[in-house]
Image (tube, helix red, strand yellow):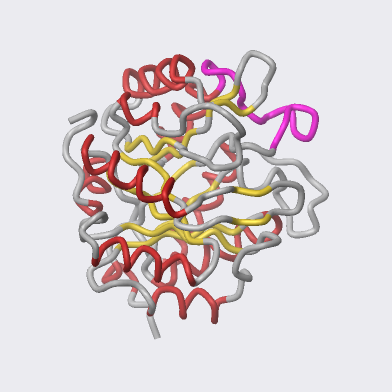
Amino acid sequence: MYYRGNELGKLIIQLAPTGIVPTKESNPSVPVTPEEIIGQTITAYRLGVSSVHIHARDEAGRPTTRKDIYEEIIAGIRKTCPGIIICASTSGRIPGGRRDEVLDLAPDMASLTPGSVTFRDSISINPSGEIMHLAREMARQGVKPEIEVFEAGFINTARYLQKKGILAAPLFFNFLMGSLGSIPADVRDLVYLVESLPEGSTWAAAGIGRFQMQVAAAAILMGGHVRIGLEDSIYRDYQERTLTTNEELVKWVVGMAQCLGREIASPREAREILGLGSPGG
């Protein structure tokens, strides 16, 4: 229904290297220091990654909203990965701290989750007032929202914000599928999500846990883009027995795209696809 080879356009690969949940204890390859995050982003960039979704950790390895740590990460990535799209997290899973401070650092994009999500061991709290505040701050500072969709109702909320003039078209959506509390990692659900989007929208998808590669394959075949990385799964196999690395995951997606006839977008091409200007501009 959707697959037309290179007629689908070039593929944006986004690396999500760290996240909030993975730890060094669960997988020693998880990057938590700015140096590790920058270093693994450089490796992925050289393999074909054109976008990176970043979370910061403090000196103890705990998730943080601290602006100084984000600043070090963003500056380091910009210096070493020319043109890469930097998407900063504004997660609602970190208690305390200002979620909007990272926007002052002029990332190209920032995550916007238009609804709360109940995970296995935590809750991402996103009340309407906070959603609107973050969306308005992104608009004011020229940061494009990456609208994170954990269930179909989030698309309706995004449509509402667009109708109210808080979000400006064209919109970019990232579907996070397969975790407890989110939409299932089923191709039928992915088709429904894509067909529910506002006209002119661009989308990507990520499979959580064991569904990472299945969702990546579906997104490639359907003309979407792909998010991959240890944030979403620390394992290489569906059985979740063998640990992996960010480098290995990126190589798998690049190889899959090549086998399925999708060319990989360069950072410049990815910026054109998403309607972004020059870095930090």
Picture quadrant of residue 204: bottom left
Picture quadrant of residue 51: top left
* Left or right of 229 on screen, residue 44: left
Residue at 32%, 18% (x, y): give it. Answer: 79
Q: Is residue 166 magenta?
A: no
Specify the farthest residue to the bottom: 1
Specify the farthest residue to the right: 241
Specify the farthest residue to the front: 129
Magenta portion: prevailing SS class: loop
Q: Position of residue 87 (x, y in %)?
A: 39, 38
The C terminus, quarter of image: top left
The N terminus, quarter of image: bottom left
Q: Position of residue 91 (x, y in %)?
A: 52, 41
Taking depth in this image into account, of 280 and 5 the one nearest to the observer is: 280
Q: Where is residue 183 in the image (x, y as percent from the top left)?
A: 60, 69
* Left or right of 161 on screen, residue 99: right
Q: On screen, 8 above or below 265?
A: below
Residue at 32%, 38% (x, y): give it. Answer: 85
Residue at 23%, 35% (x, y): give it. Answer: 141
* Left or right of 85 on screen, residue 216: right
* Left or right of 53 on screen, residue 84: left
Q: Position of residue 200 (x, y in %)?
A: 23, 69
Taking depth in this image into account, of 208 and 124 the one nearest to the observer is: 124
Q: On screen, 175 above or below 72?
A: below
Taking depth in this image into account, of 92 and 229 the one nearest to the observer is: 92
Q: Is residue 27 magenta?
A: yes
Residue at 69%, 54% (x, y): give it. Answer: 119
Taking depth in this image into account, of 51 and 135 the one nearest to the observer is: 135
Looking at the rendering, the stretch of residues picked out in magenta corresponds to: 22-36
